[in-house]
Image (spheres, grey):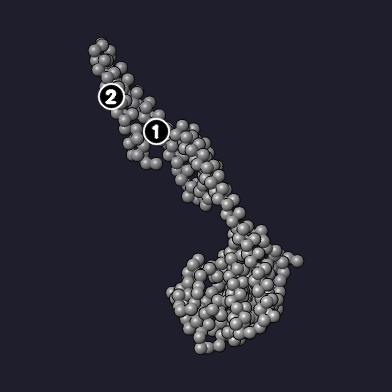
C-alpha cells in the first residue's frame, strides 16, 4: 500500500477536517482570545489527526504487505483465509470474514463436483469391467471359427481391449496411490508379460523384438509398469516405417542409485521441434496426423503422468526417420529395502 494511495482515500476526511478548523478559527477571531490559543488549537487538531492517520497507515500497510507475501508464497491460494491472522482494524476483519465465507462456499462447490466425478469414475470402471466379458466371449467364438475374416475381427478386438485398458488406467490415474502395491519385481518378467499381451500385433506386423540384460529387481507396481510398456510398444508398432521391418530392443542397465530400462525402436521417429511436446495431453504431432495414423495424443501423456505418480522418471529421445528411445528410470537406494 502506497502512502499516496492512502492519502487519496482520506482526501474527503482531510478536506472536512480543514473546513472544520477554518470554522473554529472564524469563531475564535470574534472572541478576545490570545493568538497562542488561536494557533495552538488548529495545530493540535491537525497534529493529533496526523499521528492517528500515520498509525492507521502503518498498521494497514504491514497487514496487507504480509497478506500479499503469504498469498504469493502459498500454492493453494484458497487457504489464505485460514492462514492470515485476524487484523485489529475493522476493514481487515470484514475482509477476512468475507474470504472465509468465500473459501467455505468454494470448498462446498468443489466437494459437490468431486463427488459427481467420483461417481462417474466408478461407473466408467464398472462399465469397463462389464464390457470385457462380451469381448472375451467374442474371442472364444472366434477361436472356434478360425478363418481370414474372424482373424481380422480378433485383431480389431485386441485394439478395442487396448483402448479399454487405456480408459481404465486414465480413470484411475488421479488416484494411483489407492490402487498400486509397491514391491520388488523383476524387470524381465514385466517386459515378457507386456510382449505377451501384444504378441498378436507384433506377429501381424512381423516385428523383431530383442530383449537382453533384464536381470534387475526394481521397487514398483508390476501392473502399472506392464501398462506403461504396452503403451510404448503399441506406439512403436503404430509408427513403424512402412517398407522396413520394425525392430524393438528392450534392455536395462545399472546406474548410480537407479536402474534404467530402455525401449528402443527403428521406427519413423519424431520431428526435432515436436520431441518436447509429445507428453502434452492431446498432442498428436505430424506422425499422428498422417494418413491411417489414428492418434489420440493420450498414450504418452498418460505414461508420463503415471510415471510421476509412481516416482519414476521418463525420458524420450528421437531422431526423425531413424527411431525413438524411451527410458524409464527406477530409483534405487541402499537405505531402503522393500520385501
- 170, 182: nearer the viewer: 170
Give the quarter of the image for residue 155. bottom right
Question: At 35% across and 35% down in the image, what residue appears?
Answer: 9
- State the image coordinates of residue 300 (x, y, percent, origin top left): 54, 70
For the residues labelled 1 and 2, the Cα–Cα distance comes to: 21 Å
Question: What's the mark number on residue 19?
Answer: 2
**Element on which disc 1 rests:** helix
Q: Is residue 147 above or below residue 9?
A: below
Observer able to see residue 105: yes
Query: Which quadrant does the C terminus fall into?
Result: bottom right
In this view, the mark in front (1 or 2): 2
Q: Which residue is mark 1?
A: 54
Give the quarter of the image for residue 39. top left
Q: Are marks 1 and 2 in contact (CB under 8 Å)?
A: no
- 329, 238: nearer the viewer: 238
Q: Residue furthest top?
A: 32
First of labels 1, 2 by sequence position:
2
Question: What's the mark number on residue 34?
Answer: none
Left or right of 24, for residue 157:
right
**Element on which disc 2 rests:** helix
Question: At 53% across and 68% down in the image, what residue appears?
Answer: 298
Query: Which quadrant does the N terminus fall into?
Result: top left
Left or right of 48, for residue 295:
right
Answer few, some or many: residues within 10 Å of disc 1's Cα (few below 14, many 20 plus, some between 14 and 19). Answer: some
Question: At 55% across and 88% down in the image, what residue appears?
Answer: 245
- State the image coordinates of residue 280 (x, y, percent, origin top left): 49, 67
- 160, 232: nearer the viewer: 160
Question: At 33% across and 26% down in the image, what residue appears?
Answer: 46
- State the image coordinates of residue 220 (x, y, percent, origin top left): 67, 67
Amino acid at each position: 500500500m502506497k502512502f499516496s494511495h492512502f492519502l487519496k482515500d482520506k482526501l474527503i476526511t482531510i478536506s472536512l477536517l480543514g473546513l472544520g478548523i477554518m470554522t473554529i478559527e472564524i469563531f475564535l477571531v470574534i472572541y478576545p482570545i490570545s493568538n497562542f490559543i488561536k494557533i495552538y488549537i488548529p495545530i493540535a487538531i491537525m497534529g493529533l489527526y496526523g499521528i492517528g492517520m500515520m498509525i492507521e497507515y502503518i498498521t494497514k500497510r504491514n497487514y496487507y504487505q504480509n497478506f500479499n507475501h503469504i498469498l504469493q508464497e502459498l500454492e493453494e491460494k484458497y487457504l489464505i483465509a485460514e492462514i492470515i491472522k485476524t487484523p485489529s482494524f475493522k476493514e481487515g476483519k470484514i475482509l477476512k470474514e468475507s474470504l472465509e465465507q468465500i473459501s467455505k462456499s468454494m470448498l462446498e462447490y468443489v466437494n459437490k463436483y468431486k463427488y459427481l466425478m467420483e461417481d462417474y469414475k466408478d461407473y466408467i470402471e464398472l462399465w469397463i469391467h462389464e464390457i470385457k466379458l462380451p469381448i472375451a466371449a467374442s474371442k472364444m467364438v472366434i477361436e472356434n471359427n478360425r478363418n481370414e475374416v474372424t482373424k481380422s475381427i480378433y485383431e480389431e478386438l485386441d485394439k478395442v481391449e487396448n483402448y479399454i485398458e487405456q480408459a481404465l488406467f486414465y480413470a484411475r490415474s488421479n488416484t494411483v496411490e489407492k490402487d498400486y502395491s509397491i514391491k520388488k519385481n523383476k524387470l524381465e518378467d514385466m517386459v515378457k508379460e507386456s510382449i505377451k499381451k501384444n504378441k498378436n500385433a507384433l506377429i501381424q506386423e512381423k516385428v523383431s523384438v530383442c530383449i537382453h540384460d533384464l536381470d534387475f529387481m526394481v521397487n514398483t507396481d508390476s501392473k502399472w509398469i506392464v501398462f506403461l510398456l504396452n503403451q510404448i510398444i503399441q506406439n512403436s508398432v503404430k509408427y513403424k516405417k512402412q517398407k522396413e521391418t520394425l525392430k524393438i530392443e528392450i534392455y536395462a542397465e545399472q546406474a548410480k542409485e537407479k536402474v534404467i530400462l530402455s525401449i528402443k525402436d527403428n521406427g519413423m521417429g519424431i520431428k526435432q521441434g515436436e520431441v518436447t511436446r509429445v507428453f502434452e495431453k492431446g498432442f498428436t504431432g505430424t506422425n499422428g496426423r498422417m494418413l491411417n495414423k489414428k492418434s489420440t495424443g493420450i498414450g504418452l501423456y498418460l505414461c508420463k503422468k503415471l510415471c510421476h505418480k509412481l516416482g519414476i522418471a521418463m525420458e524420450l529421445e528421437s531422431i526423425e526417420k531413424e527411431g525413438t528411445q524411451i527410458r524409464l528410470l527406477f530409483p534405487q537406494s541402499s537405505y531402503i529395502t522393500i520385501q
